[in-house]
Amino acid sequence: MWPFLYFAGDRLSTAELTSARLDGDLVELGEAFLPADAVETPELRAASLRSFLPDTLAATRTTAAWVHGAIAEAPVRHCVQRMSATRLHHVRGARLDYRESLLAADAVIRVGGVWVTTPERTLADLARGLQAGEGCAAVIDQMIVWRPQLVPAALALLAQGARTLHKRPAQAYLRARSERAIQDEVTR
């Protein structure tokens, strides 16, 4: 389906892919390899995750930020969340950070054949996660630099949403960060 992505054991073995990477012909992209001269797009980043992201899961938080292009490096542990109405009892893996709560259909978009949270939902979730002690302040800053208009959209999303943990502190943090970004822009 994706001619520019090479997965271990698909068309080439792991040894062949590693050798091509060492020769400079391929580069790693998520869970796949890509020709060194190919342009890295959100669609290719998302498609590189298809081996462990079935339709019952969506990429969220830092993984979604990487897919959208807000951060340059893929996270070591991919953040995923349930899309299925039924609970998933078999989601395990050292490289997965799985969240059980069900994602709403309007919180995700299809990118490269994989479900990914929208950029504004991603920013809102990261801000809530920061308040819960997750170390994602740098990712939040990179998302705001990438698209400053996400802050009002994430604030609106948090305001209209149901009661969730860390909602108010996340709103306060995003407002403060937005004001700081405006001040930084004025001083330039």
Image (cartoon, rainbow, N blue to C red):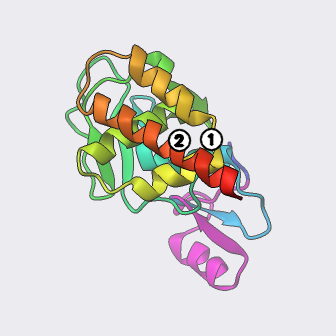
Disc marking residue 148: 1
Q: For the residue marked with disc 1, what is the amino acid?
A: Pro
* Residue 158 shows in the view: yes
Q: Residue furthest bottom?
A: 23
> Which residue position holds label 2?
178
Please name the residue shown 58% across and 35% down the image: 150
Q: Quadrant of the N terminus?
A: top right
Q: Residues within 10 Å of mark 1 (few under 14, many from 20)?
A: some
Please name the residue shown 27% across and 58% down the image: 94
Which residue range is magenta in the image? Answer: 4-30
| Magenta stretch contains residue 103 | no
Q: 14 or 64: which is nearer to us?
A: 64
Tell me: 148 left or right of 80: right
Tell me: 135 left or right of 183: left
* Residue 69 shows in the view: no
Q: 119 or 53: which is nearer to us?
A: 119
Q: Provide residue 69's location: percent of width, then percent of height.
A: 62, 50
Q: Residues within 10 Å of mark 2 (few under 14, many from 20)?
A: some
Question: Which badge, 2 or 1, is on the more N-terminal residue?
Answer: 1
In the displayed structure, 72 sits above or below 17; it is: above
State the SS at label 1: loop
Q: Provide residue 21's location: percent of width, then percent of height.
A: 63, 78
Q: Quadrant of residue 138?
A: bottom left
Are the residues flagged by discs 2 and 1 in contact, CB closer than 8 Å? Answer: yes
